């Protein structure tokens, strides 16, 4: 071999070693996200809805409205029934005040009769009044005492009866309030609300369509954080653990990679046959274990994109 060929041969061997190092990875798979399928929670025509794929939504953001005119009318009807219950209840205050005033008058008359009896008794002793006059006053006193007792009983009975009647009427209020809350919940469920912050991946509904409970409306995922679902051979299990920091990478151009820090968040406890679309470090392995690596997305990572995991980042 000629000596002038040695430098070129050395350079070629160095490049091959570098490329071999770059192609050396521990696991490979595809990026995925936690996707949420949002479905209708109420039956009715979609009155408001202008969602588009790619829209960014926030948690609790209202994106549409399903017609809820029927539960709204039902709620108003129940509310009117509750209001009517209060009109049916008895207000004992005016009647009670009237009986109390009557009792005060009777007691005042009784006191007057007591004084009159004392005066008449003195007159009888001095023969200035007859015994019949005294007997008439005593009879009047007895009648007033009976009237006062009847008035007191009437006052107590009125209060007791009114309280019982009001309790019976107001006992109907509790089930009506439950129905009111039920219709209010149905009205609330007519709103189409985003459950998470994320990007709309697919849209399945349009304004004017008929929505039914359980019908998918749109699919949303939080793409700020993606998960690389990769597969490792059993021989690599002893080198990884939950919470472990690893490196992930994607293709950047033809001969380069873009690296992302990641963290292992899940390791399958069961092995499975190697998926046909997945490459592993050991191509001869038939059984592999699925793992998930959480990766912070800078906007370049996409759901379904191919990625690789490295326990130790290779040196170029």
Image (tube, rainbow, N blue to C red):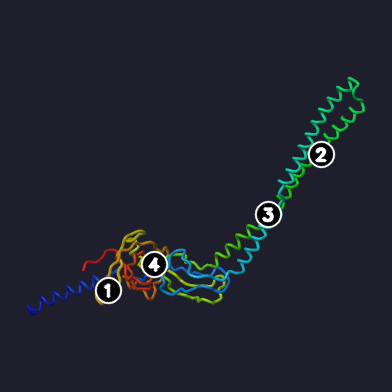
- In x, y percent, where is residue 146? 84, 36
- In x, y percent, where is residue 103? 77, 38
Q: Is residue 285 visible?
A: no
Question: Left or right of 219: which side holds 110?
Answer: right
Q: Secondary structure at mark 4?
A: strand
Q: Nearer the viewer, mark 4 or mark 2?
A: 2
Residue under label 2, please give it: 150
Q: CA distance from mark 1 to mark 3?
A: 74 Å
Sooner in the amino-acid sequence: mark 3 or mark 2: 3
- Asked if the residue under mark 2 is in contact with the one under mark 4, i.e. CB atoms within 8 Å, the reply is no
Q: CA distance from mark 4 to mark 2?
A: 90 Å
Of the pair 29 and 298, the residue shown nearer to us: 298
Sooner in the amino-acid sequence: mark 1 or mark 2: 2
Residue under label 1, please give it: 252
- Would you call the spot at circle 3 few (<14 residues within 10 Å), some (14-19), or many (20 or more)? some
Question: Left or right of 299: which side holds 15?
Answer: left
Residue under label 4, please give it: 290
């Amino acid at each position: 071999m000629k000596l002038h060929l040695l430098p070129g041969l050395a350079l070629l061997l160095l490049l091959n070693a570098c490329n071999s190092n770059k192609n050396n990875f521990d696991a490979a798979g595809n990026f995925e996200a936690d996707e949420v399928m949002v479905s209708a929670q109420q039956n009715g025509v979609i009155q408001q809805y202008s969602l588009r794929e790619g829209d960014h939504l926030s948690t609790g953001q209202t994106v549409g409205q399903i017609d809820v005119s029927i539960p709204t009318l039902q709620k108003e009807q129940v509310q009117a029934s509750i209001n009517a219950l209060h009109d049916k209840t008895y207000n004992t205050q005016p009647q009670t005040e009237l009986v109390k005033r009557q009792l005060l008058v009777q007691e005042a008359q009784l006191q007057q009769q007591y004084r009159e009896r004392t005066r008449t008794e003195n007159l009888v002793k001095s023969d200035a009044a007859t015994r019949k006059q005294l007997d008439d006053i005593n009879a009047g006193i007895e009648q007033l005492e009976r009237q006062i007792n009847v008035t007191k009983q009437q006052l107590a009975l009125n209060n007791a009866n009114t309280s019982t009647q009001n309790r019976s009427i107001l006992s109907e209020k509790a089930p009506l309030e439950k129905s009111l809350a039920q219709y209010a919940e149905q009205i609330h469920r007519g709103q189409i609300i985003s459950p998470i912050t994320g990007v709309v991946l697919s849209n399945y509904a349009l304004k004017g369509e008929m929505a039914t409970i359980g019908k998918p409306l749109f699919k949303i995922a939080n793409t700020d954080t993606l998960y690389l679902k990769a597969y490792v051979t059993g021989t690599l299990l002893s080198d990884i653990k939950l919470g472990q920091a690893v490196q992930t990478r994607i293709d950047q151009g033809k001969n380069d990679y873009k690296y992302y820090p990641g963290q292992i968040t899940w390791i399958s406890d069961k092995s499975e046959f190697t998926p046909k679309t997945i490459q592993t470090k050991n191509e001869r392995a038939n059984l592999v274990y699925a793992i998930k690596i959480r990766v912070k997305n800078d906007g370049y990572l996409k759901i379904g994109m191919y990625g690789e995991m490295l326990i130790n980042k290779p040196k170029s």
